[in-house]
Image (cartoon, helix red, strand yellow):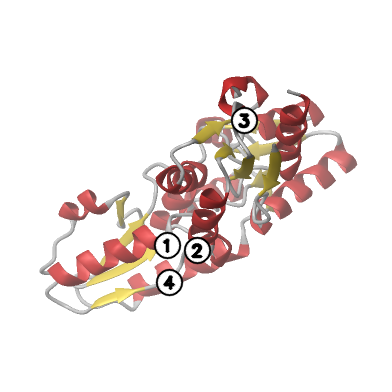
Amino acid sequence: MKINIDKNAGFCFGVRDAVAIAEQELTENKSLICLGDIVHNEKEVQRLKNKGIKFINNNEFKDLKDNAVLFRAHGEHPNSYKIAKQNNIKIIDATCPIVKNLQNKVLNAFKNGREEEQIIIYGKKGHAEAVGLSGQISDKAIIIENINDIKTIDFSKPITVFSQTTMSNTNYIQIVEKIKNLAKYEVRFNKTVCKQVAFRDKDLEEFAKQNDIILFVSGKKSANGNMLYKICKKHNINTYFISSTDDINKEWFRSVGSCGISGATSTPINQINIIKEYIEQL
């Protein structure tokens, strides 16, 4: 059986840089505090815990004083920066520059918007990036996860639409077109899906078709992972979502000529290589 690794798999540069910053801090100081999971990948989070990183939630962050805290690639709500200033917390800011740029775009759209402008964000409700984006405008954005959520929009008012950087570009375009068809005013549409993610839809579709089975490696909490897995599953019914070798069933490989392995932007390439090595030993 031939095993093929998706050439586009592995960390996006935003996550890669955030992890590199964390590891550098751990090398210098032996310990580090991070607000929220640095990446939505349970095994990578555990690896960094073993190296000395401590992950805290927002309630724990509010009570923290006189310390240093890493802000992850997803970006943070403005309130986190205010709390840091009040509590004498040094911020180690690993926010992805693409996310930071998007935060500024959302804020400027709100400031310079038309009267009663509605800011719509296509994203995962409760996801750190979506929360941070809405936070730029005092949590006044309308967050929609799918085409059914557009019923929360008032189409009689002006609308500007953005997307969380890690969402499906194909689904985003479909949602924008639906909004345009229902809107009374011209809809302002911003291309804000990260290019590294946007181009993966088509590439992943081809990769899924080229292999007999697909193993998609991702953390269960990864919005990007769940989205990309669904693309694989749509084009190859023999697609399996796994987080570790424990999830693999050797029966999947009977009478199989090729196995493709891919992963989310939050999946490190070493995890994919571990899966490959495990399959080779079966």
Q: Residue at x 78, y 25 (%)?
A: 281
Disc 3 element? helix
Mark sitting on residue 191: 4
Q: How far separated are the C-alphas under marks 2 and 1? A: 5 Å
Say what amino acid the circle numbered 2 marks.
Ala
Between 120 and 115, which is closer to the camera in this rendering? 120
Disc 4 element? loop
Between 200 and 142, which is closer to the camera in this rendering? 200
Q: Are marks 4 and 1 in contact (CB under 8 Å)?
A: no
Mark sitting on residue 198: 2
Say what amino acid the circle numbered 1 marks.
Asn
Indicate the quadrant containing the N terminus: top left, top right, bottom left or bottom right: top right
Q: Earlier in the sequence, mark 4 or mark 2?
A: 4
* Horizontal and vertical percent position of residue 196: 58, 63
Disc 2 vs disc 3: which is toward the camera? 2
Q: Earlier in the sequence, mark 1 or mark 3?
A: 3
Disc 2 element? helix
Going by the image, does 129 lie left or right of 243? left
Q: How far separated are the C-alphas under marks 2 and 3? A: 24 Å
Q: How far separated are the C-alphas under marks 3 and 4? A: 30 Å
Mark sitting on residue 169: 1
* Horizontal and vertical percent position of residue 153: 18, 58
